Amino acid sequence: MMEFLQIDSQYWWGFFLAFAAMVVFTPLVIKLAGYMGWVARPQADRWHEKPTALMGGIAIYAAATLAAIIFAQETWHWVLWGGASVMFVTGLVDDLFAIRPISKLIFQVMATGILILGGFQFLAGAPFWISIPLTFLWVIGITNAVNLLDNMDGLAAGIAGIAALILAIFAYVIGNPAHIFFLAPVAGAALGFLIFNFKPARIFMGDCGSLFLGYSVAAGGLLLQNDVGTAGTISILLLPIAVTAVPIFDTTLVTLGRIISGRSVSEGGRDHSSHRLVFLGLSERAAVLSLYGISILFGGLGVLFQFVELHLFVAMLILLMVVFTVFGIFLGRLQVYKGEQQNGQDATEQTGPPVLKLIVRYKKIIFGLLADLGIVSACFIVAFFIRFETDVSTAMLNQLHMTLPIVIMVKLFVYYLFGLYRGIWRHAGTPELIRIFLANVVASAFLVLILYAVPGYELYSYGVYIIDFLLAMFLVGAIRLLFRGLNQFFAAQQGGEPVVLYGAGNGGMLSLREIRQNESLKFRPVAFVDDDTNLQGSLVQGLPVYNGDEELKKLLRNDEVKSLLVTTDKLTDDKKSRLRKLCDANNVDCQEFYVGFRDMSKTKEEHKELVNG
């Protein structure tokens, strides 16, 4: 890493100067905002809780521009900076006078036109009727996506800074360090702004900052694509998409969520990915840092895959997109709108477009097929390259291309026959895993028989199909268990009354699952206690297991623990009596988890008498 910074370090001085300039400029803007009354007041649909200075974008633009001018040398991207300046001024006018959305869109179109006139296009070298519309869609889309992402302290600045920095690193890696003169100052200004914008924020950037940063990141992606054109690798063409994965994901989630709920897409609210993570129990800092991590993951892999074979790059990208989509669906299921019904798709099914209503109605089958389509394709490609590594001829690649469609058709058909698209993923368990195992056994065996019998196909190695079977069995199962895993992880983050569970057996697992899925219980399990000494010191569902009455006494003496929940039905009356006395001595509630059936002809009072009697 030190060697990297030492080589041609003049390219990176713009980053450090912009970062340092933010330390000077931002406090000045904070004072100016206080003097001019540029202050954001808390509102019902906003996240901050106290008056906060606005116009941080002035400092961002000034610092980035200063660094770019000083270190531009003979390379000055006047076209890119001209469009970025148009976006800064547009945002500044909007912050001051609240211009209409259509007016902002017109100026975004003009700024994008400046890029096109300067020779910068998405998929440069492609037919104009493809590249021109894609350029407008890309630049305007990413600009507004970053603008929408400015909904929590430090989020937009951090994501934009990470994206610009990764693009700058990528420019250096592929041998175009001159582009760093544009990207590094943007990254330095955005990340320097975090000193004052990370929670608790002392200043917000406003539209003048978010529009400038969004446009700069979008233009930086075009800057790299413009050098390679259609002759470049797909990894270079997809890198801008990878580094902006979080803004794209957030905008898609919010847009679809509002459409499905029958709300206006332009309506504001606390329904962004960051808000949903907080609703799930993460702190604001943890939510923002999680999205930082996702952005670094996608961007870093985009750089790494520049050195990886194209097929492997596409396969790994597909797997990441499947996981990211599952995560988006998980977040999308949260009821974040006031008055939302349990079935969040009611509005769409009644009043939405016919195509969208059809998708909503058969969403489980459609998404399951698409997810497995991506997983099956990626697994076979990865298995092929694990087996042969770099020893792959053109003829073998052609055979891979011919074989892949058969692999997809056979496996998806067998998965359908085994009922893999009838299950509810958030309740997936052992029976589902058994079906997945059997389906993959049958699919792989059937696939080998077909390819062996059909003329024109050659089985280069049975090892490919063994590796493919193992990968597909694991990943198809893992993606279905991901919903349960996410549920359990975020349930453990939720607040509530700290409780200790007595009994780590089947009853303990059942009660823990009920606690984590039933928000009305307001319990937060912190530990298990079990009489089985073999469980001592182990972890069960992320909770430590303690053994014996002495360990239980220590737990109950903790002022934070409010209840003891007995989850086993194997205790004697004497043991139950001692547990009640122990709870009373420590001023802790003692409750018993009960699962059973009752006669519907009896009243609740009669049933209680039967249970207590």
Image: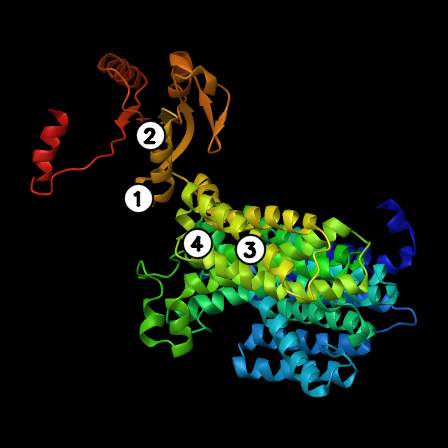
Disc 4 target residue:
418
Disc 2 target residue:
507
Q: CA distance from mark 2 to mark 4?
A: 31 Å
Toward the viewer: 395 or 223? 395
Give the mark nearer the N terminus: 3 vs 2.
3
Res 218 → quadrant: bottom right
Toward the viewer: 567 or 12? 567
Q: Could you tell me which residue is drawn at 59 percent across and 71 percent down?
A: 144
Of the residues tagged 3 and 4, which is closer to the observer?
A: 3
Res 216 → quadrant: bottom right
Toward the viewer: 261 or 146? 261
Q: Could you tell me which residue is drawn at 75 percent across and 63 percent down?
A: 397
Q: Could you say whether the residue bearing mark 3 is in a helix, strand or loop?
A: helix
Q: Could you tell me which residue is drawn at 64 percent across and 58 percent down?
A: 452
Q: Is residue 382 left or right of residue 516?
A: right
Does 120 appear above or below 164?
below
Disc 3 target residue:
446
Residue 180 point in image, percent of width and height: 83, 64
Give the mark nearer the N terminus: 1 vs 2.
2
* Mark 4 nearby-residue class (10 Å; few <14, some 14–19, many ≥20): some
Does 303 appear above or below 506?
below
Residue 513 point in image, percent of width and height: 37, 38
Give the mark nearer the N terminus: 1 vs 3.
3
Q: Is residue 459 left or right of residue 411?
A: right
Q: Amino acid at mark 2?
A: Gly
Q: CA distance from mark 3 to mark 4?
A: 14 Å
**Tag 1–tag 2 contact (CB < 8 Å):** no
Disc 1 target residue:
520
